[in-house]
Image (cartoon, helix red, strand yellow):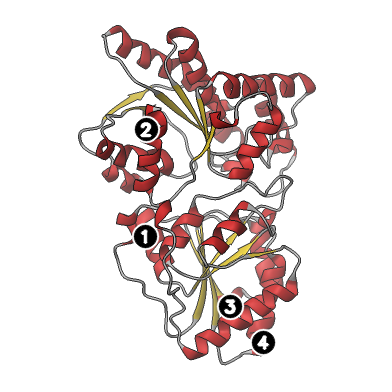
Amino acid sequence: MQRCLKFVKHLGQFGVEPTVITVDPAQATYPVRDESLLAEVPPAVRVIRTKTSEPFESYKKLTGRAVPYGGFANEGKPGLMQKALRFVRGNLFIPDPRRGWNRHALAAVEQLLAAGERFDAVLTSSPPHSTQLIGLELKKRHGLRWLADMRDPWTDIYYYKDLHHTPLASWLDARYERQVLTQADTVLVTSPETKRLFMAKLPELPSGKFQVLPNGYDESDFRQPSQPPADCLRITHTGTITELYNIECLLEAVAECAQHHPDVPLRLRFVGQVSAQLRGQIARAGLLNNTEFIAFVPHDKSVEYLLSASVLLMAIPDVPRNFGILPGKIFEYLAANKPILCVGPAGSDADNLLQECDAGQALPYRNSALMFSTLEDLVAQWRISPNLDLPAVSHHRYSRRALTARLAEIAAS
């Protein structure tokens, strides 16, 4: 959502007049909402909100649970009911349950075109990947220039196996994916590895069709000063995290480091959704008294928590094909100008980005020795000065404004 929001915020500066088609908030169902971000939509931007048809209200009534996060991060270990519902989701709602919005969105576009309006390009952003079928249909009907913005892989996304597709459902989903990749004029991806993944699926397509346009950070979000704590070495994580991110060895290294340096107050802070299983890992590591849990907060408050940290923690899910996972928050972490502890595969796109910006390196999931030595180095630096902010600033190319300028170039080419 933030990717599209920031594009819309900055496109006008590059001579592009966007029209946004989205869901009426009175009808949409999501795990969390951040109303504060509405203030970032320029007043001159036309936003058309449509009806939708989706099954999530029925899901809530059946299970008594909130709408699932991406990757089912808030569900924990699935019971029989969850497994059955995942099977239904994976086989009756292809590509996904948000597809019920498509006919309403298409009707809104048709109304604009019937009124004589003309557009130079259409951008569809996903997941949910059903949104790409809107672009596919508009391409067929009107031949509009179409940019398919693929923020994540489709049939290779890390939780795909949890949807229990039948062979027929898998075939149909892969067919949709292939049609989108083939018919779109340009496919935007957020990491080099995702580009390699899609090109390997369809090697006959020209490489120039796939453009890497990463996520980024908005400079206006980081105007307040950094305020690292002087009374503790605080390691902060923002956003959703589960046991799938495999930070157990890091938690053990933090506990060991705390035992070695009782005079250095090591603290963990998690801002956002934390799974019950991960909370259990924190408890088993003996870190509950060192850990603060803060529920979901608006985006501007989340930035404040980044700036009030000593060190930032992020993790890449420990799943197959995770070398191309480049979370949007990594760029906000870079903008906060703090050292970053990144648990994930060495040589991945995230690792390469951190090393490019001199903000850290990937700590492989089971490399306890490297994790411990990295923490020891941070403790030694903290003893000299509790302000561990980085001296170099090498991330400006990832500002949302710079990336939107690149989008405007791609759309016009």
Disc ID at residue 289: 3
Disc ID at residue 301: 1
Mark 2 Cα shell of 10 Å, populated few (<14), some (14-19), many (≥20): few
Query: In the current view of this chain or complex, which residue is farthest to the bottom?
Result: 263
279 in relation to 206, above or below: below
User: Dot 2 lies on which element?
Assistant: loop
Q: Which residue is drawn at 43% across and 42% down?
A: 3
Q: Residue at x 75, y 69 (%)?
A: 367
Q: Where is residue 71 in the image (x, y as percent from the top left)?
A: 63, 43
Left or right of residue 267, residue 113 in this image: left
User: Dot 4 lies on which element?
Assistant: helix
Residue 328, visible in the rendered structure: yes
Name the amino acid type tagged 4: Gln
Mark 3 Cα shell of 10 Å, populated few (<14), some (14-19), many (≥20): few
Q: Which residue is drawn at 71% across and 53% down?
A: 318
Of residues 65 and 197, the one drawn nearer to the viewer in this rendering: 197
Disc ID at residue 25: 2
Alpha carbon distance from label 2 to label 4: 49 Å
